[in-house]
Amino acid sequence: MSSLPSCRFRHAALVGKYQARGIRPVLEDVAHILARAGLDVSLERETAQNTGMTEYPPLTIKEIGKQCDLAVVLGGDGTMLAIARELAPFNIPLIGINQGRLGFITDIQLKDIATALPSILAGQYEEEQRAMLEGAVLRPMRGAGFETIYDGYAINEVVVSRGATASMVELRAEIDGQFVANYRADGLIVASPTGSTAYALSAGGPIMHPGLGGWVIVPIASHTMSNRPLVVSDDVTITIEIVAGRDASMNFDMQSLASLLHGDRVTVRRSPHKVRFLHPKGWNYYATLRRKLRWNEGVS
């Protein structure tokens, strides 16, 4: 039997969407591939606890960041977004195995694991770095000034939106201190190029190539038809002030939430961290768009 190519990595952490049916056998298959390639293998702690897998040591996210030089994520884009945000400060590359639906950033299909994963481990991959957003909520203090009450990172988007039972909100947007527009809408999305194929796309925003250094600001169901998506440089600070509306909130990648009050300001800027994705050799962004968005269906 021919020997496996030498591995470029030393210690891999395996992260799985443990709520998914039938996840354990797939996790075990992936772990065996990693071990056969010569890697030490660990499981993210919640993945280990919820699947009952005991063959590999469990690690917290912080421990993964300090001990591992690779993370393999099994799930959909939501699973990848959650773990990528936490691991970005550690600069660990990520491999995504798609067990969800769209899979824009988890691009290895389950049927291809046995061939695609060993090749990547041997160094046959395309590395891509994606920019992240850093958002914060600033609340006016009594007297003067603002205090930061919430902050976090997003890979796809930061969204300011109305409450579930409330009418539209009124928002004031500035870029680097310069007034841009007032928006009466259901909300406002600030999306990265990665997020331009997510919520921003469904709200009518453009698709941005991930190599572009920019953000897109997209109103959600704006009361004024002339309020259109706006593409801006990623070296600016975007400020969104809550002018009117009840029960407004802010979220990062549709996963974490902060309640907002009148006068609160949401700031969005480029994060100092980037996310590193490892794709199979020959991976192509436009082919991904074509496949996931079903372009050219029915065209011979």
Image: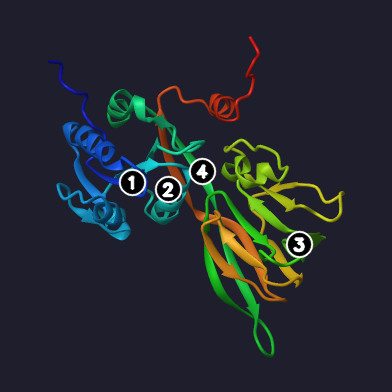
Residue 71 appears in which quarter of the rendering? top left
Kindly identify which residue carries mark 2: 79
Instruction: Tell me which amino acid carries mark 2.
Output: Thr
Quick one: which residue is furthest to the bottom in this view?
143
Q: Compute the Cα span from label 1 to label 4.
A: 22 Å
Instruction: Tell me which amino acid carries mark 1.
Output: Gly
Describe the element under mark 2 as helix, strand or loop. Answer: helix
Q: Compute the Cα span from label 2 to label 3.
A: 31 Å
Q: Compute the Cα span from label 1 to label 3.
A: 38 Å
Kindly identify which residue carries mark 1: 16
Residues marked 2 and 1 touching at CB (< 8 Å): yes
- Judge the density around disc 2: few (<14), some (14-19), many (≥20) Cα neighbours within 10 Å: many
Q: Residue at x 58, y 26 (%)?
A: 286
Instruction: Tell me which amino acid carries mark 3.
Output: Ala
Q: Residue at x 55, y 25 (%)?
A: 291
| Closer to the camera in the image, 198 or 235 | 198
Left/right placement of residue 44 relative to residue 150 reads left
Q: Residue 158: x percent and y percent? A: 61, 57
Kindly identify which residue carries mark 4: 130
Position above or below: 271 against 245:
above
Describe the element under mark 4 as helix, strand or loop. Answer: strand
Position above or below: 251 against 277:
below
Q: Compute the Cα span from label 2 to label 4.
A: 16 Å
Q: Compute the Cα span from label 4 to label 3.
A: 25 Å
Residues marked 2 and 3 touching at CB (< 8 Å): no
| Closer to the camera in the image, 131 or 240 | 240
Kindly identify which residue carries mark 3: 173
